[in-house]
Image: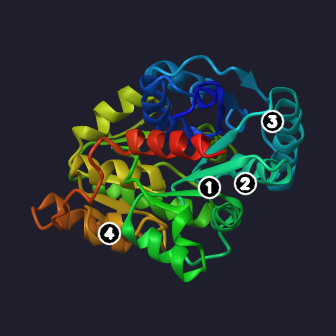
C-alpha cells in the first residue's frame, strides 16, 4: 500500500442503535491495521441518551468526532437535516470514503451526500430486501445500494439480490455479518405477551416512543395484569446482550435483534409479516410470525415445549467480518 493511503480518511456515519453495534467491530479492525484515519459522525437521529450515547461506551467506541444534531422529525425532515449538516463537514474535511450501515434515514442521507460530492461510498449490510416498499427502510436500502461504490453484504442471498438488480460483481463483497406502531396491532402484541408471561417470565425493555404510546392511548391499549411481565427502561448494549443471551425466547420486530438471536442460537419470533434478513429464517433460529396474537402464542408454546426449529450459524458469521471490511476499505482507498 502506498504511503499516501495511510493518510486517507474514512467517515463512519451512525444514527441509530443498529448502526452503533455494526460500526464498532469495523472501527476496531481498521484501527488495528493503522493505515487509515477514522472519523465517527453521529447524526443524532436517535438522541435519547439511553438509546445512543450509552452504546459508544459499551462498545468501546470513541466519543463521536462530530455530532450533527439531526434529532426527530418526519422522514424528509430527518434526511434533509442530516444532508445539510453532513455536507458542511464533508466540504471542510474532505473524506476519502463514507461508510454507512443498515437502512435508517441517516444511511440514505449520507449516501446522497457522498454521491453528490463524488466521495467513495461503502454500504455495510447491502443487498437486504424485504420486497415490501411500504417500509421506509426498504426504500432507504434500495436507494443506498444504487449509490454505493462498495456493497458489503452479510449473506449470499444479499449478493444474489444485488446481482439480480444489475450490480456489477466487482462492487459486491460478501464479508459476513458484523454483529456476531399501529395501536390495534400493538394491543394485540401486548395481549400475546400477557399470555406468554403465564408460561415464563417476560422482560420488555420499552423504547421511549412505545412508552409514550402507552401513556397517550387513553385506555385503548392496556398492559396485561401479570406479575410475570416486567417493563424496564432501555438498556445499554452489553447489558441487553447479557439479557438476550440467557433468554429462552426472543420476540422482536428489530432486524438487528433477529441477527443477534441467530448468532446466540436463541429462538426468535419476528413480530412482522416479512424480514429483510431471510438468512436468519433459512439458517438461523428466526421464525416470522406476523402480529396476530394467536400465531405468536402458538409459536411461543412450540419453543417453550422443546419443539423450536434448530438453527445454525450462517457462513462468515464468524467474528471476522469487521476485518474483511477493513481490508476492502484499505484496498479500495489504495487504488484511488
Of 92 and 15, nearer the camera is: 92
- Residue at image x 38%, y 69%? 156
Looking at the image, is mark 1 or mark 2 earlier in the sequence?
Answer: 1
Q: CA distance from mark 3 to mark 1?
A: 16 Å
Q: Earlier in the sequence, mark 1 or mark 4?
A: 1
Instruction: Say what secondary structure mark 1 lies in.
Output: loop
Q: Is residue 103 left or right of residue 61?
A: right
- Relative to 329, say whether 50 is above or below: above
The local secondary structure at tag 4 comes to: helix
Return the disc, 4 or 3, that comes first in the chain's sequence.
3
Rounded to the nearest angstrom, the CA distance separating label 2 from label 3 is 14 Å
Q: Do labels 2 and 4 touch, CB within 8 Å?
A: no
Residue 114 screen position, x and y as percent: 77, 48
* Percent position of residue 116, x then y: 85, 53
Looking at the image, is mark 2 or mark 4 earlier in the sequence? 2
Given contact means CB atoms under 8 Å apart, are the residues at marks 1 and 2 in contact? yes
Residue ID for mark 3 = 70
Real-space Cα separation, disc 1 to disc 2, in angstroms:
7 Å
Label 4: few (<14), some (14–19) or many (≥20) C-alpha neighbours in 10 Å: many
* The label number, if any, that marks residue 108 in the structure image: 2
Give the spatial CA distance, label 2 vs label 4: 26 Å
Query: Do residues under tags 3 and 1 come within 8 Å of each other at their CB atoms?
Result: no
Does residue 21 appear anywhere in the picture?
Answer: yes
Residue 13: name its quadrant: top right
Residue 22 place in picture, x, y as percent: 48, 41
Q: Residues within 10 Å of mark 2 (few under 14, many from 20)?
A: many
- Pick the front one: 156 or 291: 156
Label 4 belongs to which residue?
281
Decide if residue 279 is on the left or right side of residue 127: left
Task: Provide the residue designation for mark 1.
Answer: 103
Amino acid at each position: 500500500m502506498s504511503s499516501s493511503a495511510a493518510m486517507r480518511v474514512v467517515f463512519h456515519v451512525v444514527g441509530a442503535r443498529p448502526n452503533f453495534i455494526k460500526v464498532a467491530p469495523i472501527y476496531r479492525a481498521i484501527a488495528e491495521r493503522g493505515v487509515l484515519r477514522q472519523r465517527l459522525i453521529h447524526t443524532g437521529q436517535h438522541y435519547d441518551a439511553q438509546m445512543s450515547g450509552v452504546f459508544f461506551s459499551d462498545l468501546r467506541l470513541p466519543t463521536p468526532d462530530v455530532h450533527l444534531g439531526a434529532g426527530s422529525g418526519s422522514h424528509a425532515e430527518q434526511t434533509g437535516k442530516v444532508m445539510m449538516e453532513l455536507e458542511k463537514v464533508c466540504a471542510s474535511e474532505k473524506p476519502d470514503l463514507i461508510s454507512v450501515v443498515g437502512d435508517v434515514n441517516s444511511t440514505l442521507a449520507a449516501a446522497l451526500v457522498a454521491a453528490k460530492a463524488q466521495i467513495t461510498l461503502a454500504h455495510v449490510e447491502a443487498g437486504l430486501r424485504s420486497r415490501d416498499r411500504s417500509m421506509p427502510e426498504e426504500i432507504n436500502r434500495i436507494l443506498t445500494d444504487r449509490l454505493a461504490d462498495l456493497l458489503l453484504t452479510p449473506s449470499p442471498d444479499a449478493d444474489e439480490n444485488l446481482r439480480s438488480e444489475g450490480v456489477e460483481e466487482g462492487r459486491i463483497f460478501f464479508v459476513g455479518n458484523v454483529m456476531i406502531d399501529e395501536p390495534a396491532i400493538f394491543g394485540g402484541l401486548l395481549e400475546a405477551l400477557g399470555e406468554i408471561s403465564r408460561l415464563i417470565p417476560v422482560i420488555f425493555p420499552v423504547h421511549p416512543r412505545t412508552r409514550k404510546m402507552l401513556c397517550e392511548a387513553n385506555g385503548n391499549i392496556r398492559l396485561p395484569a401479570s406479575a410475570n411481565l416486567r417493563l424496564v427502561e432501555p438498556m445499554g448494549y452489553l447489558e441487553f446482550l447479557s439479557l438476550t443471551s440467557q433468554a429462552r425466547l426472543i420476540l422482536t420486530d428489530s432486524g438487528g435483534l433477529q441477527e443477534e438471536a441467530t448468532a446466540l442460537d436463541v429462538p426468535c419470533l419476528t413480530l412482522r409479516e416479512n424480514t429483510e434478513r431471510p438468512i436468519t429464517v433459512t439458517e438461523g433460529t428466526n421464525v416470522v410470525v406476523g402480529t396476530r396474537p394467536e400465531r405468536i402464542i402458538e409459536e411461543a408454546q412450540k419453543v417453550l415445549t422443546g419443539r423450536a426449529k434448530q438453527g445454525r450459524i450462517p457462513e462468515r458469521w464468524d467474528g471476522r467480518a469487521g476485518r474483511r471490511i477493513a481490508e476492502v476499505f484499505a484496498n479500495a482507498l489504495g487504488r484511488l
